[in-house]
Image (cartoon, rainbow, N blue to C red):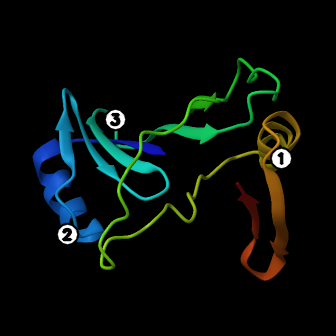
Amino acid sequence: SLQIGVAELDAAVRDYQTFLSQPGERRGVLHRFPLQRGAVELTVGEPGVRSLRFRREASDADPPPDWNGIRVVLDAREEEEVPPPPPAVPHAIDHVVVQSPDLDRAVALWRDRAGIRLALDRDFPQRGLRILFFRS
């Protein structure tokens, strides 16, 4: 699941209702859009990614204490049961893009400490760009 901070909740909810083809539901200070796998949550605050939640096996090691500014929750509890969405509703989060000034640190964090598979590490020297793709 992904939690996103937004400057204006009502406006963002309207946009995401259109984007995700569903109304979602208000839960206190946030608005949650459940998907077949995961969810997108909007909350008022500094715009951008606030937290990520990954389901893990109960036997996995405890998560590291330092996630470089992004709240990451690794838990063994099951997500709440969500009925299959209608065909027009997106079924899952495919990927999240996060910029980092230190991609080697990102590899050490996400692959080495969190155990998320690094599926692609590619340089584009002509554009001065390197991208990493982690598959959960």
**Circle 2 crowding by C-alpha within 10 Å: few under 14, some 14–19, many from 20:** few
- Residue displayed at 75% across by 71% down: 128
**Residue 100 horizontal side relative to residue 116, left or right:** left
Q: Nearer the viewer, residue 64 or 104?
A: 64
First-in-chain label (1 vs 2): 2
At label 2, the amino acid type is: Thr
The image quadrant that residue 53 belongs to is top right
**Residue 57 horizontal side relative to residue 8, left or right:** right
First-in-chain label (1 vs 3): 3
At label 3, the amino acid type is: Glu
Task: Using the numbered discs, state the Cα–Cα distance from disc 1 to disc 3 in whole angstroms.
Answer: 25 Å
The image quadrant that residue 83 belongs to is bottom left
Q: Nearer the viewer, mark 1 or mark 3?
A: 1
- Residue displayed at 58% across by 29% down: 69
| Numbered circle sitting on residue 18 | 2
First-in-chain label (3 vs 2): 2
Q: Nearer the viewer, residue 111 or 90?
A: 90
Task: Using the numbered discs, state the Cα–Cα distance from disc 3 to disc 2 in whole angstroms.
Answer: 22 Å
Give the image location of residue 106, x and y in percent.
77, 44
Give the image location of residue 134, x and y in percent.
74, 58
Q: Nearer the viewer, residue 11 or 82?
A: 82
**Circle 1 crowding by C-alpha within 10 Å: few under 14, some 14–19, many from 20:** many
| Numbered circle sitting on residue 46 | 3
**Circle 3 crowding by C-alpha within 10 Å: few under 14, some 14–19, many from 20:** few
| Numbered circle sitting on residue 94 | none
